[in-house]
Amino acid sequence: MDAPIEITFRRIEPTDRMRAKIDELIGQLEKYEGEIISGRVVIDGQNKRGQKTVVSVHVELNYPGGTAVGRREADIPQPAGQRGFDSALTEAFHTAARQLRSHFAKVRPQESNQLEHQPQHGRIERLNKDVRNGFVELPGGSSLFFSEAVLQGDYDALAIGDEVLVLPAEAESPYGPQASLVKPVAPLA
């Protein structure tokens, strides 16, 4: 990751395992390459409750227009060993990453699943009048299978080359990708 992420340890001696876990979690932010301007990870150990050290994890990721923040605490040592710290660190990073995802889904909805299932324009590529199904060619060159059951209109009025609106289905048919809706586009008068 090219964005500078500052790592600070206060009142606790960092171990190689701690540093490796932080590096691993920073590596998982690669999909936001170029979006994160800078960041900061602060691990603060405070001696509390007898021999246990309470470790506070603070993750800040700065992006244009805001900051994503994740915070968690863990006791060290504990019967679970290093897992308490790893869990707190992971949860703090995931909280900040969720805030990033939420922000960028609002800024660029076309990159999220919000627009994935919008109707697309296509043309009737093939028709099989005997079994009343066919294929729609999409602008990218791919084809979607459709049956009369998903057609909004008169199957007998369709002709090869007709323009239609088509909604891709999530599941595939035995013929490959299929449409969940096909609607002929009326010619302009």
Image (cartoon, grey):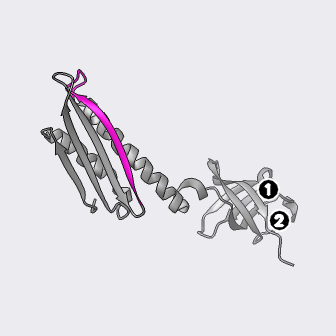
Of residue 122 and residue 71, the one placed in the foreground of this image is 71
| Residue annotated with mark 2 | 158
Q: Residue at x 82, y 65 (%)?
A: 158
Q: Which callout, 2 or 1, points to the residue nearer the camera?
A: 1
Q: What element carries label 2?
A: loop
Q: Position of residue 16 (x, y in %)?
A: 14, 41
Asked if residue 177 is among those painted magenta in the image, a careful observer would answer: no
Q: Position of residue 155 (x, y in %)?
A: 84, 59
Looking at the rendering, the stretch of residues picked out in magenta corresponds to: 66-81
Disc 1 crowd, CA 10 A, few/some/many (<14, 14-19, 20+): some
Q: Where 179 sits versus 22, above or below?
A: below
The numbered mark at residue 182 is: none
Asked if residue 76 is among those painted magenta in the image, a careful observer would answer: yes
Q: What element carries label 1?
A: loop
- Magenta stretch, main secondary structure, is strand
Q: What amino acid is labelled 1 in the image?
A: Leu
Q: What amino acid is labelled 2 in the image?
A: Leu
Of residue 178 and residue 20, the one placed in the foreground of this image is 20
Q: Residue at x 43, y 47 (%)?
A: 98
Point out the residue furthest to the bottom here: 189
Instruction: Locate residue 46: give its quadrant.
Output: top left
Whether pointer 2 and pointer 1 mark residues with C-beta atoms closer than 8 Å, the reply is: yes
Give whichever of discs 2 and 1 has the lower sequence position: 1
Q: Is residue 87 left or right of residue 155?
A: left
Of residue 61 and residue 128, the one placed in the foreground of this image is 61
| Residue annotated with mark 1 | 151
Q: In this view, does 75 lie to the left or right of 179?
A: left
Instruction: Locate residue 124: give its quadrant.
Output: bottom right
Q: Where is residue 17 in the image (x, y as percent from the top left)?
A: 18, 39
Q: Position of residue 24 (x, y in %)?
A: 26, 47
